[in-house]
Amino acid sequence: MPISPNFTSVLSKDWEINFTQCTPNGFLKYTDLCNILQLTAAAHSEVGGISFFDMQEFHQAWVLSRMRVEITALPKWQDVVTVKTWINSLENSRSVRALEMYVNGKKIVGCETYWAVFNTQARRPEPLALPYEHFELFPENRATTEGFSKININHDKEAVFEKTVYLSDLDIVNHVNNVKYLEWCLDHVDEKRILKQEVKSFEMNFMKELSLKDQVVIHESEDDNHTTATFSITKGEKTCFALELHWK
């Protein structure tokens, strides 16, 4: 798709929270929060001419490498949220994108994401083949109080679940969708902490892709103060994903 005549370097998009996106208490699931953020990023790439379909001409796609989400509050069923997004940096094969979510003009979520250009045939990163100079960059305008980081993995932590990758776990790039990793881990969190919205922030590192029929193990550990929980997902001896949850 060509660059839209309505293209702007900062995009705002409204979403109405529907009942399929909510937990039993009526508030947005953390996984669907990530889906809304990702869909907003995709919408911005579409109007800017660097969408999945644009990039597939060169067998390329954006894949998520790291993500940090800071949460003040969650929206509830029938809320209309506004998500604003812009790009902090974009060069060669890498991009840092900021996103913020608002309800009634009040910011409730800040998110920083790190993306890589991925060749879907060669299965490796490579420079973006499309022009992107029309995007104004905002390196100083950060959406989170802290940037994303490399999660420190405790290799002695407990194995809590074994999982086989099914077709329903895969996305259009033919690997496990980033939100699925989060869903697998949150299924092993005390549901009371989720329903009470005790997650202050979480951070995810995506290290190696997973494919259909892969066998993985989910591991969990918690710090001594019970303020941070860390999960990792391994395939054989290799860590594919890490999640760090910070509690309120």
Image (spheres, grey):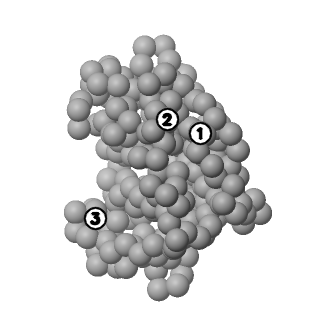
Give percent across and percent down for residue 123: 48, 24
Q: Nearer the viewer, residue 130 or 96?
A: 130
Judged by depth in the image, the label closer to the viewer, 1 or 3, is 1
* Quarter of the image where one finds residue 169: top left
Give percent across and percent down for residue 64: 52, 42
Q: Which residue is mark 2?
A: 58
Q: Are marks 2 and 1 in contact (CB under 8 Å)?
A: yes
Inspect the image, locate mark 3, and give the three-letter code of the amino acid beneath it: Cys
* Quarter of the image where one finds residue 166: top left
Inspect the image, locate mark 1, and give the three-letter code of the amino acid beneath it: Ala
The CA distance from mark 3 to mark 2 is 37 Å
Looking at the rendered structure, the secondary structure element under dot 1 is: loop
* Quarter of the image where one finds residue 201: bottom right
Q: Nearer the viewer, residue 231 or 88?
A: 88
Inspect the image, locate mark 2, and give the three-letter code of the amino acid beneath it: Phe
The reply to whether residue 17 is visible in this rendering is yes
- Chain-order first, disc 3 or disc 2: 3
Q: Is residue 22 left or right of residue 108?
A: left
Q: Which residue is mark 3?
A: 22
Q: Which residue is mark 1?
A: 129
Judged by depth in the image, the label closer to the viewer, 3 or 2, is 2
Please give the name of the residue rendered at 69% of the width and 55% of the height, measured from the top-left corner: 133
